[in-house]
Amino acid sequence: MATAATLPTTSAVPRQISRKARRAAWTRRILIGLAFLLTALFLLVPVAVIFQQAFARGVPTFWANITHPETLHAIWLTVLVALIVVPINAFFGLCAAWAIAKFQFRGKKLLIALIELPFSISPIVAGVAYLMVYGSRGIFGPWLEEHGLQVMFALPGIVLVTLFVTCPFIARQVLVLMQSQGVDEEEASLSLGAGGFKTFLYVTLPNLKWALIYGVILCNARAMGEYGAVSVVSGQIRGQTNTLPLQVDLLYHDYNAAGAFAAASVLAVLALITLAVKTIVEIRSRTE
């Protein structure tokens, strides 16, 4: 039998709880402080340096660098590639997610693995692979040259590799939500006489709205920031096939630091806009 000396007194129990609560509060404060400190060191400071260096020589120099014909072309090409790639990936992602989540068929796991393949392959390797397929010495290269079609070192090649590296983003976002929702609502719609397209348009698509928008945002950010694969297939031709990330690298290696940071600031602004839109979408999706 426990003696009275071994039992905690009534006043000791609240003190123990109070000490544990204080330790937990201090642990929480330390972790939060570390999170803010690391965020500032690895994210905020580099972004601040980009803008500081971009305007270091004054606004006129910054504006002259931004409006340089080669930089303007790089900005235009980056936006153009994103405008082509994102809608194609949105259509593909919806179709692939619909097929995987709503139907049973052989090869489903293989299809999922193929969709996720770009996550595990280096963009540089992807660029080289496309070069070996569509380049002048590739599988289809001679046939393309005979018909006057240029894929590599031109816009089509940049679009193809960007499609490859951004392929999983929309499909995975939509697929996870589709799988969690099941097929009950679609089956009910079909039983009431609605066709497949009408069911998709009025039942499935509204449920996927936020996942689709979120995937589009991620896909767009990846498309605009892609460097590795594009650097291989573009040829990095000045004023023709340089996207904005390639232009930043080119200017930096030309010892034009002001121009490089000015171009980088455009990418940083696009990234911040993407982050803001992403945050708004996340908040809106939680409130609905």
Image (tube, rainbow, N blue to C red):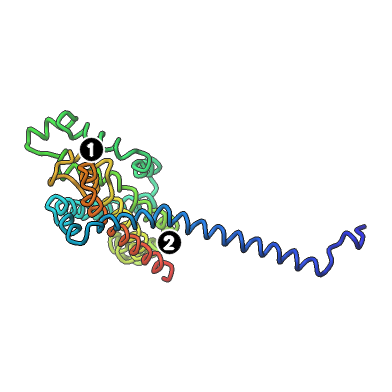
Mark in the foreground, 1 or 2: 1
Q: Position of residue 22 (x, y in %)?
A: 66, 64
User: Measuring 34% from the left and 44% from the top, which residue is drawn there?
Assistant: 115
Q: Amino acid at mark 2?
A: Asp
Residue at the far bottom: name it: 287
Whether residue 190 can be seen here: no
Whether residue 192 can be seen here: yes
Residue to which mark 1 is pinned:
232
In front of the other: 169 or 183: 169
* Quadrant location, the C terminus: bottom left
* Quadrant location, the N terminus: bottom right
In front of the other: 204 or 118: 118
Q: Secondary structure at mark 2?
A: helix
Residue to which mark 2 is pinned:
184
User: Measuring 53% from the left and 60% from the top, which residue is drawn there?
Assistant: 32
User: Measuring 28% from the left and 47% from the top, which residue is drawn there?
Assistant: 226
Report how many numbered discs are placed on residues in the image. 2
Q: Amino acid at mark 1?
A: Val
**Quadrant location of residue 277?**
bottom left
Residue 18 lies left or right of residue 40; in this view the side is right
Q: CA distance from mark 1 to mark 2?
A: 47 Å
